[in-house]
Image: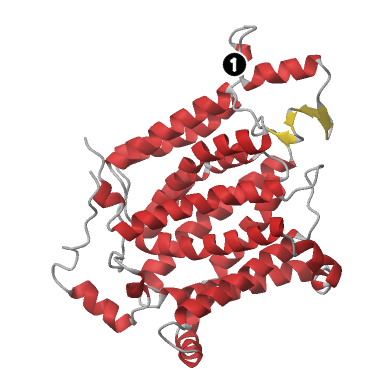
């Protein structure tokens, strides 16, 4: 069976969005890791960085909306669809937790291990997708999702327990070699493999496992619920107005976290702001802001299932980039996990999920700013998709 490219990417622009989304997320792990101190801590307030990112997203979305409209129109639209604004508090809160936990987990795990563990969200996303959209996945789709999860679990396999080989280049063999040379770190009473102070062994029964699970759950719930708002409850709302809703709510959530920690006013002190006004930190703000904008287009014109596969595909590039940038080795465990994940992605492309809801495929960015009445006409027009097919073989 050939790959159904036209079902995966209805238009050329959706394919560009897919590539851009993947590239930006690869950059997130790289940039956050590069901004860390030698002891893997952060020399800046990470919650403040997330808050500034949401403010920057709000400014960008407002400017994009005002290309064809004005601020008075934006205020009118926000007031008119204030019920949708209230609904966005749910994904905004979940994304707030997700973004802040990303800094915590990237201080514990190397980027490749971090992205591998996050792939555990795939099956959960599949279940939530069926419940919310009432679109049941086929057997092939479920097999690809399960393979993707198994590929992530393969990171945990200790090949040294099956055989003993001096040439074994698995991660477990490297662990044993480092133990023999007394290069190990004791954390909370147990021994954990570290490379450059990072956990490369995957899940363990510790607080770091709780944090990565929490981030995974937040990702699943936020992604599917956000897609639901974009395609159903808020399908007739301008996408940039929807982004304004999301970022207004996200600013409130992050400000609440700073207030709870007693850091709301100190977070914007000259000392804290000076630690943020560095290229290594500013690039994180700009990159994450771009991720937020691109993700809204991704979920509106594609779907959360394809989004999880885009995240899995990032593993291939993240592993290679981390090897060259941070000298983080690629062990047999990681290589096999990436191979299984890659096959799962290939299998999924044979029978992808298609879920446009009430939304017409996006051919150009000007359509995204169309008024809701124009969108309804587009949805009802016959043969509207005739010129939107991709020329991919």
**Up/down of 333 relative to 285, above or below:** above
Q: Position of residue 30 (x, y in %)?
A: 62, 46
Q: Position of residue 138 (x, y in %)?
A: 29, 42
Q: Is residue 131 visible?
A: no
In depth, the one of 62 and 237 nearer the eye is 62
Quadrant in the rendering for residue 198 = top right
Quadrant in the rendering for residue 237 = bottom left
In depth, the one of 145 and 47 nearer the eye is 47
Colour scheme in use:
secondary structure
Q: What residue is at 54 percent from the left and 51 percent from the top? A: 25
Which element type, helix, strand or loop, lies under badge 1?
Answer: helix
Q: Is residue 336 left or right of residue 366?
A: right
Q: Is residue 121 left or right of residue 113?
A: left
Q: What residue is at 19 percent from the left and 64 percent from the top? A: 385
In depth, the one of 106 and 221 nearer the eye is 106
Quadrant into which the C terminus falls: top left
Q: Is residue 359 left or right of residue 228?
A: left
Quadrant into which the N terminus falls: top left
Disc tally is 1
Q: Position of residue 167 (x, y in %)?
A: 61, 9
Kindly identify which residue carries mark 1.
159
Q: Residue extending furthest bottom?
A: 72
Q: Residue extending furthest left?
A: 382
**Up/down of 344 relative to 392, above or below:** above
In depth, the one of 128 and 347 nearer the eye is 347
Q: Position of residue 213 (x, y in %)?
A: 62, 45
Q: What residue is at 81 percent from the left and 42 percent from the top? A: 38
Disc 1 crowd, CA 10 A, few/some/many (<14, 14-19, 20+): some
Q: Is residue 331 visible?
A: yes
Q: Is residue 42 left or right of residue 390?
A: right
């Amino acid at each position: 069976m050939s790959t159904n490219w036209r079902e995966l990417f209805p238009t050329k622009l959706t394919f560009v969005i897919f590539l851009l989304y993947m590239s930006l997320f690869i950059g997130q792990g790289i940039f956050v890791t590069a901004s860390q101190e030698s002891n893997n801590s952060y020399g800046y307030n990470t919650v403040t960085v997330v808050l500034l990112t949401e403010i920057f997203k709000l400014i960008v979305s407002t400017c994009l909306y005002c290309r064809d409209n004005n601020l008075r129109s934006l205020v009118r639209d926000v007031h008119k669809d204030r019920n949708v604004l209230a609904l966005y508090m749910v994904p905004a809160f979940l994304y707030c937790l997700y973004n802040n936990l990303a800094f915590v987990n990237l201080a514990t795990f190397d980027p490749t291990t971090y992205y591998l563990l996050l792939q555990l969200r795939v099956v959960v996303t599949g279940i939530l997708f069926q419940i919310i959209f009432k679109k049941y996945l086929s057997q092939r789709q479920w097999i690809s999702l399960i393979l993707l999860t198994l590929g992530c679990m393969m990171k945990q396999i200790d090949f040294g327990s099956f055989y003993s080989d001096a040439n074994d280049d698995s991660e477990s063999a490297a662990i044993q070699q480092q133990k023999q040379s007394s290069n190990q770190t004791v954390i909370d009473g147990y021994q954990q493999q570290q490379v450059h102070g990072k956990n490369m062994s995957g899940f363990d029964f510790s607080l770091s496992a709780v944090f990565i699970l929490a981030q995974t759950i937040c990702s699943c719930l936020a992604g599917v619920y956000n897609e639901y708002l974009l395609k159903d409850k808020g399908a007739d709302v301008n996408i940039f107005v929807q982004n304004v809703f999301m970022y207004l709510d996200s600013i409130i959530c992050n400000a609440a976290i700073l207030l709870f920690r007693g850091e709301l006013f100190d977070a914007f002190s000259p000392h804290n702001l000076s630690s943020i006004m560095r290229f290594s930190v500013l690039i994180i703000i700009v990159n994450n802001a771009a991720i937020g904008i691109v993700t809204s287009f991704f979920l509106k014109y594609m779907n959360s299932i394809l989004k999880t596969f885009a995240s899995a595909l990032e593993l291939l590039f993240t592993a290679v980039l981390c090897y060259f940038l941070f000298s983080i080795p690629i062990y047999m465990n990681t290589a096999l996990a990436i191979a299984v994940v890659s096959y799962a992605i290939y299998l999924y492309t044979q029978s992808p999920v298609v879920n446009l809801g009430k939304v017409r495929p996006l051919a150009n960015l000007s359509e995204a700013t169309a008024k809701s009445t124009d969108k309804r006409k587009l949805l009802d027009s016959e043969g509207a998709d005739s010129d939107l097919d991709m020329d991919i073989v």
